[in-house]
Amino acid sequence: MAPIHGSFGWDCIHYGVDKRFHVDRFQTCRRADPGLDLGGYATDLLGFTLVRHEEAAYPVCLEEFLTSYNSTANSPMDQRDLGTCIALAVSERLRRASWLTKAWADHLLGVLEALSATSGKTGGLD
């Protein structure tokens, strides 16, 4: 258990005029498994690479992200465990999205499909 954002995704990250990254929308902060936040980030990363047909970038970026995270984490995250966290993040996005359009639902389901197509591999796409 650790403090987590609770609904972390790319829409929470902003690059400021001070040339620093800022994270917002902390209204759902709580103590939970950090994998929930990591899964949210990985979900957005996977979706981003799928939309741009650059799936090969996903494992490289994910490995760099997890290496950086694990270098300071009290409980490092293994890529093999991340697939479940991604599925949970997609499920949560589908559940809470009152603005959900068919296109966005199809996008999220595509993320799950890409994840399940590589079941048993590390963190989704390899």
Image (cartoon, grey):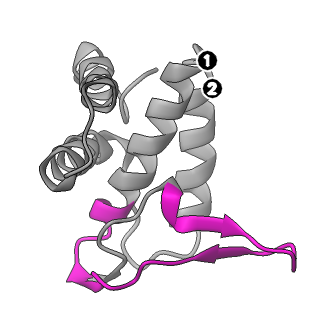
Residue that appears at 18% across and 44% down? 94
Residue that appears at 21% across and 40% down? 87
Left or right relative to 125: residue 62: right
The front one of 114 and 82 is 114
From this viewpoint, is residue 1 visible? no
Residue that appears at 34% across and 26% down? 107
Please give the residue where the numbered disc 1 appears in the rendered image: 54
The numbered disc on residue 74 is none
Which structural element holds mark 1? loop
Q: Where are the magenta residues, as a range? A: 11-37
Residue positioned most to the right: 18
The image shows residue 50, relative to residue 9, as above or below, that is above
Amino acid bearing label 1: Glu
Give the number of marks. Answer: 2
Was residue 114 drawn as part of the magenta stretch in this picture? Answer: no
Residue that appears at 87% across and 80% down? 18
The front one of 126 and 15 is 15
**Residue 9 x, y percent position in the rendering:** 44, 57
Amino acid bearing label 2: Ala
Please give the residue where the numbered disc 2 appears in the rendered image: 57
Which structural element holds mark 2? helix
Asked which quadrant contains residue 55, the reply is top right
Left or right relative to 34: residue 67: right
The image shows residue 38, relative to residue 106, as above or below, that is below
**Residue 32 x, y percent position in the rendering:** 21, 78
Circles 2, 1 touching at the beta carbon (< 8 Å): yes
**Residue 49 x, y percent position in the rendering:** 55, 26
